[in-house]
Amino acid sequence: MSNPELEITVYEDIQHLASLWRNDRIRNSDIRNSSHILRRLLIYQDLQKCANPRKHPLTVNAPNNKLLINAARNGALEFFQSGGTTVLGIWFRASTVAKGNGQKMAGILKGFDPDETVVLKLSSFLKQPVFFFKDQMIDRADVIKYVANKAGGPHFDKNRTNKDKVLDYIRAAVSMRLENDVPTFGFNVDALEHPSDNFEIVKDSIDPVFVEMAATCRYLTESPAVQTLCKMIQEQHGI
């Protein structure tokens, strides 16, 4: 049976997330304060609970990260981030770090299309790797749980799993900030040998882990299947 209260809440939350990622000047607090929504929709499966009574399959047109994942597994990359949203006023899709010269990097990324997507079931969307660092793949579900449970979403908790620690290292190594109103992206190469969890809070910066949350909002709310479900809910409940 359907649950009207749950369905209306899910519909409204999807609209909120859709407006969130479209904000060119999104702040860390905007993403962090919405992490409980992504956790409830995806980790606690409230979105799926709305689709099940209608037998409506949920899929997402997700970024195609296969080349990045394979390169990382083969030892060609030290770091990658998936991205797929607007950051500091510019479009950001995938960043990579590899030891060696630019020619080597060009070879690694040959054939990579940042606009290519792949249709994934909701469960596969959550399991898709969006970070790689220190020989560890971090998937989308890991990121959502980290922000919601550890980094000041509904909870702030310093207890860490191995993947949580890697996300701490990424936050310290990757910088995304405005310098004289110019978007600047950087990676501290010292972190490759000596990772640290001591990241700085810098004015006009955006947290790289939070960027993946914004990208998740984008891919989820742009999903034709999710949009169709929202239309079903809207028509059934007259909202």
Image (tube, rainbow, N blue to C red):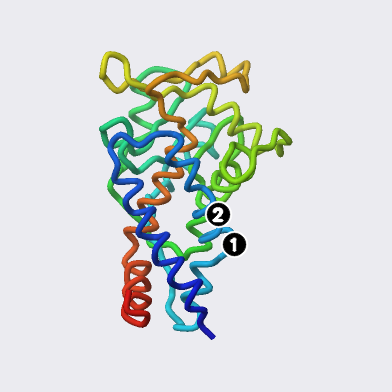
Q: Quadrant of the C terminus?
A: bottom left
Tell me which amino acid carries mark 1: Tyr
Q: Is residue 33 above or below residue 166?
A: below
Residue 230, percent from left and from top = 36, 71
Q: Residue at x 60, y 29 (%)?
A: 168
Q: Residue at x 35, y 59 (%)?
A: 15
Q: Is residue 188 above or below residue 44?
A: above
- The answer to whether residue 170 is left or right of residue 150 is left
Residue, disc 1:
44
* Residue 105 numbered mark, or none: none
Residue 56 or 119: which is nearer the viewer? 56
Q: Residue at x 34, y 46 (%)?
A: 21
Residue, disc 2:
39
Residue 121 or 113: which is nearer the viewer? 121
Whether pointer 1 and pointer 2 mark residues with C-beta atoms closer than 8 Å, the reply is: yes
In the image as oriented, which residue stretches furthest toward the bottom? 1
